[in-house]
Amino acid sequence: MQATDIGDPNYFHRVVECQWACPAHTNVPEYIRLIAQGRYSDAYMVNRESNVFPGILGRTCDRPCEPACRRERVDGSPVAICRLKRVASDLRDDITGLLPVAPEGKNGKRVACIGAGPASLTVANDLMPLGYAVTIFEAASQPGGLMRTSIPSFRLPAQVLEEEIGYIVNMGVEVRYDSPVTSLGSLLGDGYDAVFIGSGAPRGKDLEIEGRHDDPAHVHIGLDWLKSVAFGHISSIGDRVLVIGVGNTAMDCCRTARRLGGGDVKIMARRPRQYFKASPWELEDAEEEQVEIVVNHAPRRFVTENGRLVGMEFDVLEWDEHARQSRKLDTVFLPCDDVILAIGQENAFPWVERGLGFEFTSDGLPVVDAVTMQTTLAGVFAGGDAAFGPKNIIWAVAHGHEAAISIDNHCRGIPVGERPPAQMALTSQKMGLTEWSYNNDYNPSPRQQMGHVDLTKRFQELHLEVELGFSAEQTMREVQRCLNCDVQPVFRAPLCIECDACIDICPVACLTITRDTESESELRSMLTVAAENLEEPLYISEPLAQTGRIMVKDEDLCVHCGLCAERCPTAAWNMEKFDLRLGRAGIGALL
Amino acid sequence: MPSINKPLIPLAAMPKNEIGLTIRDYEGSMSTLCAGCGHDSVTAAIVRALFELSVPPHKVVKMSGIGCSSKTTAYFDSAAHGFNSAHGRMAPIATGANAANRDALYVGISGDGDSLSIGAGHMVHAIRRNVHMIYVIENNGVYGLTKGQFSASADIGSAAKRGEANTVAPVDPVMLALSLGASFVARSFSGDKEQLVPILKAAAQHRGLALIDVISPCVQFNNHYGSTKSYRYVREHELREIDPDFIDTAREIVADLPRDGALMVAMHDGGLVRFRTLPADYDPTDREAAMRYVNQANARGEIPTGLLFVDESIPDVHELNHTSETPLVELPFEELCPGSAELEEFQQSFV
């Protein structure tokens, strides 16, 4: 077999499962170690480098890192990565002195961003320190985009939002509030060197069934309704509320309704629970607030009496095994005072004129290159929900970083496809014969549970944050659950004397010395424990000096405890920290 | 020693043996030997053999003397009984324990210092008596615990770490055992568990003393160029022809039975040893042939490994001494000690 090329930054990156799964590739193990050392500000800055909004994401992220976490495979529950991110944010000192600053002398290039949401803010964050003049056009009177309007303040306090947006805007970004862009054509005519579209997917879907427009005052579109609540235009709702939809927005709607006077709030779902789009923890939080979840009910019509909404009719469905085909069992009437529709959101580009050369897909999304974020118009880029439809904040941030690289290239006359390469460093963690600069012991603690504000209290105050954050004790336990997947056992074949010490000590039997073979599937079956998880790579050495056999490590099982390196008499195995340095706007220029 | 204990990590279901235990249940405390010590590999092989044989952990008795090798009994099977005796006295203590309780599995671990110098006399007599036990010699050719002086198994010409060569003829435990009439003689290498584990399993099923000389390199004092007991030297000079497979008859073995006429030897407790590869004229049940083969290989500077000789017909210590079928520990006190009147009567019979 071909020996593994550990000089390829992608190899070890893939082993650091959380970092690999994070769209912005946040260096999770590194910031968790910094939290363990009480270095909260440093942990915050490690986060900020890649995800820009640690305080916001520490509360609202969709956490693609957590299902990927190695700890999940070990004891069934991942490290509470997202919560620890919030710990770093909550306990940090004043970090303003550590933030990047924009130079006084500008480079003469002007960039326009449409929408003051996470994607545009990330672009501004990356370009301002390079000397660009960035102008953001925002339709609302405050920045944040959907982070402000669709995430309720009891999940994301306004102060957290303002602080982290401030770090970017205070570099000298010009934000024009109450300034919706009404024509891309005229914006292009204003002489900007590049335009970034980060206007989100702001339009909530409607449900056109019988009776929809009979009492429009009591049928609300979820996104618009949440926005009105956020800006203080709506402060009450009827006692009986039906929320149609099963995504995270639906959960935010029902929890907000509970705070505005909704006593009997129901989530109405067409399909069984396992097909819900909402993150499991958001569902749990809604249920904790006594929201009833009703499955297998498809909306049939709105019922009004004398022009006042009195309820809705639903078809009760029975589904086949994989919920593909349904059969109608019955029709039921559920009385209600208000209905909130949270069945999805769409992009809307009424302000993009035809004939500019700006093309759309058949789904109504702009045609955007997935790597460069460039649209079909050179110099016009897009990211976040505006480019690829509703996703998550962390995706918008990732797109923003890539778009910033492209904009920088574009403005300097470099092809946008020329991306600054990822770089890596491996640093030995050896401090003594059996001493490492990381805590390698396995801690069997279970995942720590987040404390919540008392139910009655949270319904009295709309803006009261529900999650309390981890206590010092919880934090200390949770950080020790991290397996430090970035500290890699690195093998140097010429040093190995084939004594078997590493194989004998390995607590998970992930190591094998075996004869070489041509086929990976045969090799996988020859290991100490057959490597059945094909998603995970094998780390294969060069032939060993004495017998010509090969050392193989199954990355699926390894828990990075470092015992192989402690028992290795020749330091053929050594624990080395993998540090990934991703390409960023401006970094390429330095190379 | 390692900075942490080997953690118990609840990864996907670990395989269980016939009595419902995992391999981790046969482990002991963390080794304090040098990193890379061959002895730790022997320990790992013993753990695997006991696991695969489904031996109840409390039915094992671990015996040892003094030396690096003799520390290793602490590193496997924490639930076993054990006795760490004075230097060289592992064999007599094991003999005594064996006399008292014939039902346990005796695993004696010794070294080239413990067995070929100070305890050589004891080892010789344990072999003569055919004490029912596994007798492992972890053989590294040096006194590791006292910083690397030559031991009695150092070959002539083998260089010490500082360069001077040994001039005194070595004791070869394999030739010694063969000449003493041993019933089970094997040699293996700590770096070759594929061979060592089946030998250990066959030894556990052997009735009598199963002597296994395991070349187990000392990484600290005897793993350099010029040493004849380094990992590299053994790998370059090992003659690995007499390779046994141990087949436990408790399992379905039909598919395993050879159709190619490979040599099979039945063990006392029903297990079978199949010899996978052999020189054409080699018969592991022929003592003279074995001695000739080992002698010739030694003369060529080769290290013959494998199960070299086995004879299940030789009576063991209990048969030789007509001991009670019931282990002495299980006899009621009145039977074990009939009283002064009986003694008096017995003594009178000699008058």
Image (cartoon, coloured by chain):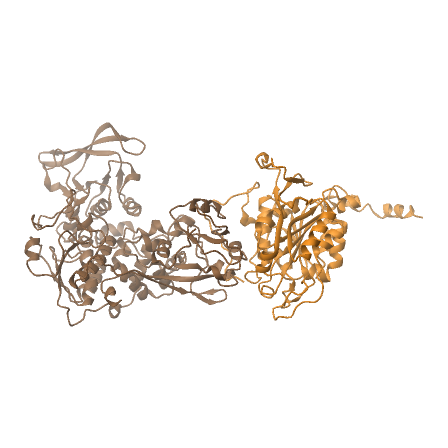
Chain colours: A brown, B orange
Q: Is residue A177 above or below residue A251?
A: below
Q: Position of residue A58 (x, y in %)?
A: 28, 56
Q: Nearer the viewer, residue A337 or B64?
A: B64
* Residue B39 in view, yes or no: no
Find the residue positioned furthest to the right: B351
Asked if residue B279 lies left or right of residue A107, the reply is right
Query: Is residue A28 visible to the viewer in this orientation of the structure?
Result: yes
Locate residue B252: give its quadrant.
top right
In the foreground, B239 or A562: B239
Q: Position of residue A5 (x, y in %)?
A: 39, 57
Nearer to the camera, A123 or B142: B142
Q: In which quadrant of the rendered image does the N terminus of chain B lie?
A: bottom right
Quarter location, residue A38: bottom left
Where in the figure is residue B256, as x and y percent of width and height?
58, 37
Left/right placement of residue A6 relative to residue A511 reads left
Instruction: Give above or below for A76 relative to A484.
Output: above
Q: Is residue A14 shown left or right of residue A177? A: right
